[in-house]
Image (spheres, rainbow, N blue to C red):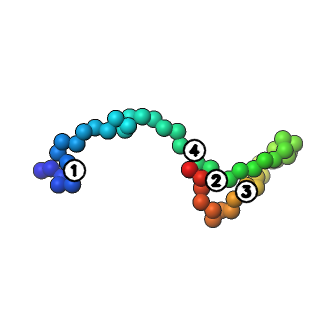
Amino acid sequence: MSDPQTPKSEKPNPFEAVPIEVTISVGRARPLIRDLLNMGENAVLMLDKRIEDPVDL
């Protein structure tokens, strides 16, 4: 049996095999190198967005 929602002679899409790069940004920070070097384990880097804000895709 064939699926009634799938066309029988569907042509392959040439774009399906093209790789793309996706970058997801949750926020940005501009710390000084001095501050990064002083950060210890479990340190928190404050970003410019809140946790409720959408990510940039």
At 38% from the left and 37% from the top, the residue drawn is 15
Q: Which residue is mark 2?
A: 26
Distance from disc 2 to disc 1, alpha carbons, whole Å, reads 37 Å
Q: Amino acid at mark 1?
A: Thr
The tag earlier along the polypeptide, 3 or 1, is 1
Distance from disc 3 to disc 4, alpha carbons, whole Å, reads 17 Å
The tag earlier along the polypeptide, 3 or 4, is 4
**12 relative to 16 in the view: left or right:** left
Q: Which residue is mark 1?
A: 6
Task: Residue 49 in the image: state x and y as whole percent.
Answer: 69, 59
Q: Amino acid at mark 4?
A: Thr
Give SS at disc 1.
loop
At 64% from the left and 53% from the top, the residue drawn is 26
Task: Residue 9 in the image: state x and y as whole percent.
Answer: 18, 42
Q: Amino acid at mark 3?
A: Asp
Distance from disc 2 to disc 4, alpha carbons, whole Å, reads 10 Å
Tell me, yes or no, if residue 49 can be seen here: yes
Q: Which residue is mark 4?
A: 23
Q: Which residue is mark 3?
A: 48
Give SS at disc 2.
loop
Task: Residue 43 in the image: state x and y as whole percent.
Answer: 77, 52
